[in-house]
Amino acid sequence: MKPFLILQLRPETKASNDEFEAILEKGGLDQSETNRIRLDRESIPDGLSLRDHSGVIVGGGPGCVSDAESEKTETEKRIEDAILTLMPAITDTDFPFLGCCYGIGILAHHLGAKVSKQRFGEEVGAVECQLTNDGKKDPLLKEFPDQFMAFVGHKEALQDLPAGCAHLLASSPCPYQMIRYKSNVYATQFHPEADSQVFEARINIYKNEGYFPPSSAEKLIEFCHQQDVRVPGQILRNFVQAYK
């Protein structure tokens, strides 16, 4: 099989490594079956061809697409620009793509939809996601329960469904939890790779990044371990199985 291109944005090495391991585990991938690029440290190589890959998976990160340019660090600007340079080829050719967390903002921004902190931001924790009618028919969500829990934590969100997209999953705090453009370009607002152990690590790493009061970290960790969050990882597994 061709490798999956894994693009990561997290500048914290532990967070990046934990996310990569979670993507491998939930996707049923071996490291040798991936081409991993940490965009906080590396550039996308000149001449990289999507055709040499089975699909693209974009991880999450602390940056926000909707932040003003003056609010973004040089690393955040470079990461955003790098991913956006790939998006025309991905959307034009309907190339298999799964954007997790940050990836939904990138996809929507590229498609001309509004991404902002105005509405639908989510506190760190778990939310109940519901299948829409389109979601019930989507191959990546085949045999999924009508409702399931997923881990979230976002300062920004889609304000409207981008043109040309199917709306697959919703939640009460944020209506646009998963979307699909054309047939093969997917993105989620929640973290499909995250289980309670992964989220505990992220809470500790990002507790001073404005997602929640640092003093509430231990209670958040306890809450996350009480949640039954096992279904979302199947999205990664289904994506890999569909396109490998």
Image: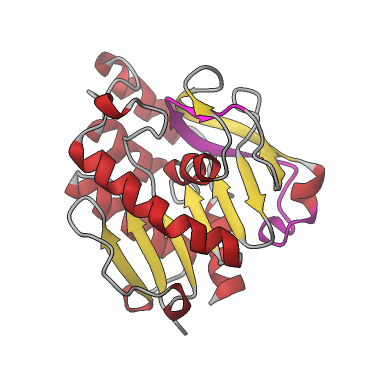
Total marks in image: 0
Residue drawn at 46 percent across, 60 percent down: 26
Highlighted range, magenta = 137-159
Q: Is residue 173 visible?
A: yes
Apparent side of residue 198 relative to residue 113 in the rendered image (left or right): left
Residue drawn at 50 percent across, 64 percent down: 89
Q: Where's residue 46, x and y in %? A: 27, 71
Q: Place residue 113 in its image quadrant.
A: top right
Residue 143 forms part of the magenta stretch: yes
The residue nearer to you, when weighing 83 against 3, is 83
Residue drawn at 42 percent across, 25 percent down: 155
Residue 31 forms part of the magenta stretch: no
Q: Is residue 238 visible?
A: no
- Depicted 128 relative to depicted 212: above or below: below
Residue drawn at 46 percent across, 46 percent down: 103
Q: Place residue 213 in its image quadrant.
A: top left
Apparent side of residue 112 relative to residue 32 in the rendered image (left or right): right
- Depicted 87 relative to depicted 36: above or below: above
